Image (cartoon, grey):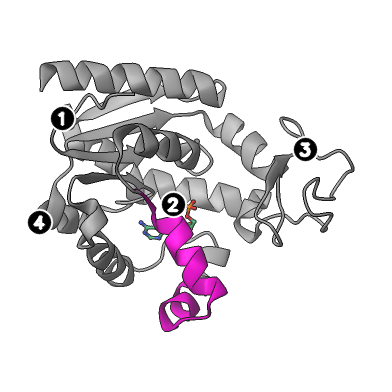
Amino acid sequence: MQSAFPVLVRIIILGPPSSGKGTLASVLAKEHGVPHISTGDILRGEVDRRTELGQKAASHMSKGKLVPDDLVIRKIESRLSQEDCARGFILDGYPRTVGQAVALDKIAAPDVVLHIDVTEEEIIRRATGRRVCKTCGAIFHVEFSPPKTADVCDICGSKLAIREDDTEPTVRKRLGVYREMTAPLIERYGDMLVSIDGNGTPDETLERARSALRDVGRNA
Ligand code: AMP
């Protein structure tokens, strides 16, 4: 699909945990020909490789808390300075605090912020049913996309696991953190922000996002 933004595409996807940011960001990134940058994925990679940042981030992440701004800001600034971001990027899960948004404005202010609006009840249902394969990375859901055999990966046969931050108390904690630390960004971005309903299927959310971006592109 032709990008609605001919020159530069800097899109932020904002939304609570399990709102579908990652799925949406990966499709939009392909459609617009820019990298999909997820701070959650970057941080999980650092934790798996036991880097210095990963060791500092791990305890915050497993408790459902945010990783401190200075660590995340430094990491994202280095990622955004890479060659592949010259035409723009889709940011998934960043910024999550006002401090991060201020830092981003100084190096690469966004063109548009897509806010995925999902009820808390739906988020709990999505997150607590998710099962991941730590061997091959496949993701299942007990209700929406169950594996053929309970708790066994269809692809590689490994035992499925619940991501540490997907347990119900942690999801509730993450929702509280979202309300307190991230939701204020909705107001901060003002006219630059477009809200879409994310309570439906991933395809419905994608269609709403595409249509919102077309409208923004037309008015740019
Ligand atoms: P996510 O996969 O985006 O839900 O992120 C998983 C976890 O990584 C979050 O619960 C935070 O602990 C951490 N994290 C991801 N992005 C950020 C960010 N922008 N600022 C602080 N912590 C983050």
Q: Is residue 11 above or below residue 133?
A: above
Q: Which mark is residue 106?
A: 4
Is the CB atom of the residue marked by disc 4 within 8 angstroms of ligand 1's nearest atom?
Answer: no
Left or right of 163? Residue 146 is right
The residue tagged 3 is 142
Label 4 element class: helix
Q: Which mark is residue 6?
A: 1
The stretch of residues the image draws in magenta is: 36-57
Type of the residue with mark 2: Val
Kindly give the residue lying farthest to the bottom in the view shown.
Answer: 52
Binning the other alpha carbons within 10 Å of mark 1 as few (below 14), some (14 to 19) or many (20 upward) gives few
Q: Are marks 3 and 4 in contact (CB under 8 Å)?
A: no
Binning the other alpha carbons within 10 Å of mark 3 as few (below 14), some (14 to 19) or many (20 upward) gives some
Q: Earlier in the sequence, mark 3 or mark 4?
A: 4
Q: Which mark is residue 177?
A: 2
Q: CA distance from mark 4 to mark 2?
A: 25 Å
Number of marks in picture: 4
Left or right of 160? Residue 107 is left
Binning the other alpha carbons within 10 Å of mark 2 as few (below 14), some (14 to 19) or many (20 upward) gives some
Label 2 element class: helix
Q: CA distance from mark 3 to mark 4?
A: 43 Å
Type of the residue with mark 1: Pro
Q: Earlier in the sequence, mark 3 or mark 1?
A: 1
Labels 2, 1: front one: 1
